[in-house]
Amino acid sequence: MASSALMSLRRARTLPAVVALLALGACGSPSGGPGGSSSTAPPADPDEVAAAAAGWGAAPQYVLTTSAEPFAAVATAAGVYGADGFSLVFSDPATAGAFLLSATGNAMTADDCPRVPLLSVTGDEVAGPVTCTDDGDLLERAAGDALEYVVQRDDVTVRLSGEAADGEALKEAARNVRVPSHDELAALTAGTPGGGNPLERGDLPPGDGAPDNSVGAGG
């Protein structure tokens, strides 16, 4: 991988890690239906995906989801990853287990694999030497107790990452990567501040957008 791509991967920690941690704690709840096999519902309309992507600040081609029993998407942990990628946390409420789906344009080859750190569920890099194994159309990566599967979808690189993770669940998630259905996308945007739309400041008046700090009648 080119050095610029590696730098991009390291900058990718703009994932809202605090939001992800909160989502896995008291204030977040899984949404988007149960885990399990790949959804049979058709993908959401491209315009619908583009609108949701714009709200997150992500490029539409990176807005992807997956499914793996018994994990479910945590809507409050969906958002931009790096410059314009997308990330989404999946959790198992019964065990507090979790994994991260991240999608970017940074291609990863077998030669690149040992040089790129694995990701934790919060998007941080995992320390330690990386081992890589080809698993059909997937790339299996491990470092310490962290495990990651990488799958290439056209020009999009999708990483399914977890620590002390269930390897079979991660592999299932890697094989089920897809564009969200209408219902899945609606669940994700409903759990996002602003409903998946850019947030608007309430104190900005019309015109040049400067806040109105004038003092009204009576002081």
Image (tube, rainbow, N blue to C red):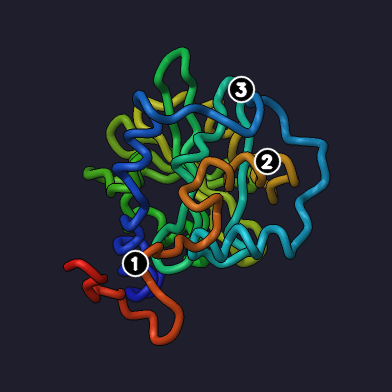
Looking at the figure, which quarter contains the N terminus? Answer: bottom left
Callout 1 environment at 10 Å: few (<14), some (14 to 19), or many (20+)?
A: some
Circles 3 and 2: CB atoms closer than 8 Å: no
Pick whichever, 203 or 47, lies toward us: 203
Residue at (82% x, 46% y) in the render = 42
Looking at the figure, which quarter contains the C terminus? Answer: bottom left
Residue at (26% x, 71% y) in the render = 216
Eye-nearest disc, 1 or 2: 2
Residue of label 3:
69
- Secondary structure of the residue carrying numbered label 3: loop
Pick whichever, 26 or 103, lies toward us: 26
Callout 2 environment at 10 Å: few (<14), some (14 to 19), or many (20+)?
A: many
Instruction: Give the left or right position of residue 78, taking residue 214 as reference.
Output: right
Identity of the amino acid at label 1?
Answer: Leu
Callout 3 environment at 10 Å: few (<14), some (14 to 19), or many (20+)?
A: some
Q: Earlier in the sequence, mark 3 or mark 2?
A: 3
Vertical placement of residue 206 versus 139, above or below: below
Residue at (69% x, 47% y) in the render = 180
Residue of label 2:
184
Distance from disc 1 to disc 3, alpha carbons, whole Å, reads 32 Å
Pick whichever, 160 or 218, lies toward us: 218
Eye-nearest disc, 3 or 2: 2
Q: Residue 143 in the image: state x and y as whole percent.
A: 31, 39
Q: Earlier in the sequence, mark 1 or mark 3?
A: 1
Residue of label 1:
6
- Secondary structure of the residue carrying numbered label 2: helix
Instruction: Give the left or right position of residue 172, taking residue 206 as reference.
Output: right
Identity of the amino acid at label 3?
Answer: Glu
